[in-house]
Image (spheres, coloured by chain):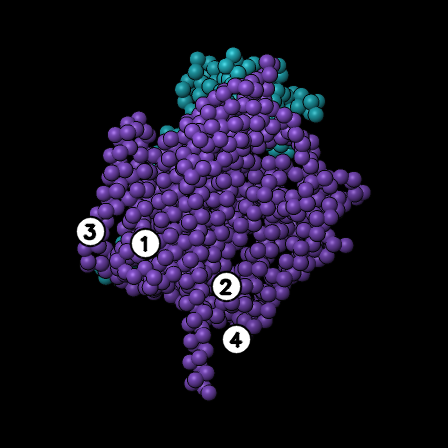
């Protein structure tokens, strides 16, 4: 019954979405005021998807094996948390989650958006309904999560052990909230293009959504990177895997949008460009979903291989992106010119930021899709990996990071003051870092060396916007910007340190043997069998010594029975100046064990930087919402006084 | 700048960015993309020594040997038509085993494939699509193993 209730809720929601779209057409075409009913419909639609998603959680929590999806992806002996998280650790469940978030985002737009004109809101709600409708159809016709099995099997097939990890419970929902948050920017842009009301009011309405989505994408990417780092046991934090790129591309577009939207909000300029970016940002989310969900990639995440679904998703993608671009082509040119600005100005700085981010987005996009394209056209197989992305995107990212220090110093419209003098100290810091790395480590690669240089400069340059004023009177949004830009410097520092100073040791050892890695002496004490709820494992006990520091690490190799699989559970110990990372492999005939040890100085700064960047976004969002709240209060007071 | 010029400048800047991205990507792909080969391709001389590439196939049964240092393995990758010896230094990934599919990343050196990374089948259901059309006899072999 529960599964059927979920399915019924989905059908109802789809019907409401269709109605919502019809009401939009009526409202825009003839004199018909559908705004109020559309708002209520959007809210009810959001609640219905929430009900459907709750039903899915219930069947997973109860291990109801009569539901095909539960049978395929769960098992009765799994820990409870992974039973529930398993609901979205698979294709159908995660698509239901996607649709749920999409519909709830639509509900919130209906409830909260008061800043755009009624017409634009109606058009945006209609656009959101069309988006939801396509994905409802996808669920109902190509990926029904509630399909039943008869007779019900006694136990399920289990969940990929790689995914039985706290990271799974947190990582996909965060990314999806980010992806789908961008759908609101898309819908608002489409709505504004339809009504022609592209102005700073629209930008202010769009901004909290973009900021929120961007914060979650940043957190999702940071968390995903850390998950891959400790779970896959390869010691890397970013693999340029297409699935990682699938989350990076919307982030790049959202980052560009986040900056250009400020120009539109503050100055009313860059209208067409900002609308374009809003369309591209969500298109990239859909491209990401397509790449991950169609199963055309070689990757951990692409668990389903099913051409029907891939084609369906590709068709949806083509229709939505195509329609949005046609609309943009028809309406973009009729938009009024924005406010003028000069070559040296905040606006120009943000244009440069946008251009570089777009180029990076372009090369990541091409690199990710090129192998698929070549295989489709010529049947030849090739892969584009880290060498390409590092060589092409790396230098661009460094140039961008260097300019991050300059842009915030410039004034809107035109800059006549000698602002570049402020950069003396940062430039000195950067130069010293460059000289120090050349003198001490002449053999260092060029990218980490430049990474240190730019990071040292940016650590100082990023805080300049707070230096020449009373920092406690600066708006929260300025603090947010400074924290986020500072975070870039920190992350860059971590990446450079990791690339330049990681020591690795790969060797075999018998109990009692000692290995060295970086400043550490690592003693293999013993190797013992151990077991968990649904796995058995061998566990190595390592004692690592550095001066007075003594720590014990216990890496494992785990064996899961359903489905049969092995995973390396790395043991990681974090210190203020780096991480000791250990993996145990298999024994050889003589009873010696393979050990892989890394000492990674300052590697944690990478994720600390990511968290700082997200925190900066959160501060900015808080600042914007705070202002919004007070302005609304002030408006209300004004009305009360006037009409009292 | 006059408003009209401003729009023009922005459009030109956007086009320049687009072209720059395309040129950069083309340059990068030309120098950095690595092709996927099977042992049969290598036997036919399609792959060049020293060039970065991927090798895919089944790990031949009984072919995994540990070298004396304990952390280097040698094994044969086969596609049913030809075999390529592979050397890999490191802890092979989860689910790397004989009779199972694997993709190695690295380069050819004197006819031996020096692997930097090995990607194996991640679980029972997942299989790199590049291995999907390997010869049927090896698939049959895999099914027997189950």
Q: Which of marks 4 and 1 is nearer the N terminus?
A: 4
In the rendered picture, chain B carries what hue? Answer: cyan
Mark 2 vs mark 3: give the one in front: 3
Q: What element carries label 4?
A: loop
Q: Who's purple, chain-wise?
A: A
Q: Where is residue A345 drawn, in percent x and y? A: 25, 57
Q: Where is residue A569 in the image (x, y as percent from the top left)?
A: 57, 32
- The residue singled out by tag 4 in the image is A31
Q: How far apart are marks 2 and 4 (CA)?
A: 18 Å
Q: Which residue is drawn at 56% across and 30% down?
A: A555
Q: Which one is nearer the viewer's eye here, A244 or A17?
A: A244
Q: In the orientation shown, which residue stands out farthest toward the front?
A: A548
Locate residue B101 relative to residue A258 in the image: left or right: right
Tell me, for residue A421, which label it has, or none.
3
Q: Sequence-wise, which precedes: disc 1 or disc 2?
A: 2
> Which residue position is annotated with label 1?
A350
Tell which residue pokes out farthest to the right in this image: A151
CA gap, disc 2 and disc 3:
46 Å
The mark nearer the N terminus, 3 or 4, is: 4
Q: Do labels 3 and 1 share a chain?
A: yes
Q: What secondary structure is found at the residue carrying circle 1? A: helix
Question: In which quadrant of the rendered image does the N terminus of chain A lie?
Answer: bottom right
CA–CA distance between discs 3 and 4? 59 Å
Which residue is identified by label 2? A124
Residue closest to the eye, A641 or A90: A641
Q: Distance between the residues labelled 1 and 2?
A: 27 Å
- In percent of width and height, residue B131 lies at 57, 27
Residue B11 is at least partly visible in this image: no
Q: Do the residues labelled 4 and 1 touch (CB within 8 Å)?
A: no
């Amino acid at each position: 019954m529960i599964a059927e209730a979920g399915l019924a809720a989905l059908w109802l929601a789809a019907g409401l979405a269709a109605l919502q779209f019809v009401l939009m057409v009526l409202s825009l075409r003839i004199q018909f005021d559908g705004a109020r009913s559309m708002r209520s419909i959007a809210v009810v639609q959001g609640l219905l998807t929430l009900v459907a998603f709750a039903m899915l959680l219930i069947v997973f929590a109860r291990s109801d094996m009569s539901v095909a999806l539960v049978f395929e992806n769960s098992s009765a002996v799994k820990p409870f948390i992974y039973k529930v998280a398993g609901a979205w650790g698979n294709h159908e469940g995660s698509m239901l989650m996607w649709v749920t978030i999409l519909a709830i985002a639509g509900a919130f737009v209906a409830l909260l958006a008061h800043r755009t004109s009624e017409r634009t809101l109606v058009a945006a709600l209609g656009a959101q309904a069309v988006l939801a409708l396509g994905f409802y159809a996808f669920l109902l016709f190509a990926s029904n999560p509630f399909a039943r099995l008869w007779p019900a099997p006694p136990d399920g097939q289990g969940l990929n052990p790689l995914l039985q990890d706290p990271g799974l419970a947190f990582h996909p929902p965060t990314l999806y909230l980010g992806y789908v948050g961008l759908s609101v920017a898309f819908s608002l842009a489409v709505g504004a293009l339809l009504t022609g009301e592209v102005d700073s009011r629209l930008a202010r309405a769009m901004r909290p959504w973009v900021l929120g989505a961007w914060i979650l994408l940043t957190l999702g990417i940071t968390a995903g990177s850390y998950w891959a780092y400790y779970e896959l046991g390869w010691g890397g934090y970013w693999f340029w895997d297409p699935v990682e790129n699938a989350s990076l591309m919307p982030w790049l577009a959202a980052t560009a949008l986040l900056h250009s939207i400020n120009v539109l909000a503050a100055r009313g300029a860059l209208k067409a460009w900002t609308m374009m970016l809003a369309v591209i940002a969500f298109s990239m989310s859909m491209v990401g979903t397509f790449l991950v969900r169609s199963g055309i990639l070689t990757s951990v995440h692409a668990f389903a291989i099913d051409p029907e679904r891939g084609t369906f998703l590709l068709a949806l993608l083509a229709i939505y992106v195509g329609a949005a671009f046609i609309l943009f082509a028809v309406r973009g040119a009729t938009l009024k010119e924005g406010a003028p600005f000069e070559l040296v100005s905040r606006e120009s700085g943000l244009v440069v930021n946008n251009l570089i981010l777009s180029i990076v987005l372009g090369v990541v996009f091409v690199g990710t899709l090129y192998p698929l394209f070549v295989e489709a056209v010529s049947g030849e197989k090739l892969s584009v990996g880290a060498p390409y992305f590092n060589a092409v995107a790396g230098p661009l990212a460094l140039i961008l990071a260097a300019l991050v220090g300059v842009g915030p110093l410039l004034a809107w419209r035109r800059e006549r003051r000698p602002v570049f003098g402020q950069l003396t100290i940062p430039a000195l810091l950067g130069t010293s870092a460059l000289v120090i790395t050349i003198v001490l480590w002449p053999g260092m690669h060029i990218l980490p060396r430049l990474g240190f240089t730019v990071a040292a400069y940016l650590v100082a340059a990023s805080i300049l916007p707070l230096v020449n004023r009373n920092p406690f009177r600066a708006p929260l949004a300025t603090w947010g910007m400074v924290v986020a830009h500072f975070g870039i410097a920190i992350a860059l520092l971590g990446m450079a340190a990791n690339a330049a100073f990681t020591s690795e040791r790969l060797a075999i050892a018998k109990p009692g043997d000692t290995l060295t890695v970086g400043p550490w002496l690592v003693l293999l004490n013993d190797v013992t069998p151990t077991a968990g709820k649904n796995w058995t494992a061998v566990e190595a006990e390592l004692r690592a010594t550095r001066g007075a520091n003594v720590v014990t690490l216990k890496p494992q190799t785990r064996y899961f029975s359903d489905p049969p699989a092995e995973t390396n559970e790395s043991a990681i110990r974090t210190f203020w100046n780096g991480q000791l990372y250990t993996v145990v492999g298999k024994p050889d005939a003589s009873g010696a064990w393979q050990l892989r040890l890394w000492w990674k100085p300052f590697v944690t700064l990478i994720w600390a930087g990511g968290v700082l960047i997200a925190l900066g976004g959160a501060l900015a969002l808080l600042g914007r919402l705070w202002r919004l709240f007070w302005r609304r209060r002030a408006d209300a007071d004004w009305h009360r006084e006037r009409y009292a | 700048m006059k408003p009209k010029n401003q729009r023009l400048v922005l459009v030109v800047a956007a086009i320049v960015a687009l072209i720059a991205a395309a040129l950069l990507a083309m340059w990068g792909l030309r120098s950095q993309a690595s092709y996927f080969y099977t042992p049969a391709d290598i036997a036919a001389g399609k792959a060049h020594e020293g060039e970065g590439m991927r090798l895919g196939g089944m790990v031949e049964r009984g072919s995994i040997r540990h070298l004396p240092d304990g952390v280097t393995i040698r094994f044969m990758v086969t596609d049913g038509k030809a075999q390529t010896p592979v050397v890999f230094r490191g802890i092979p990934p989860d689910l790397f085993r004989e009779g199972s599919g694997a993709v190695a990343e690295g380069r050819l050196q004197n006819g031996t494939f020096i692997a930097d990374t090995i990607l194996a089948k991640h679980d029972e259901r997942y299989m790199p699509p590049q291995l999907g059309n390997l010869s049927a006899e090896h698939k049959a072999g895999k099914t027997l193993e189950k």
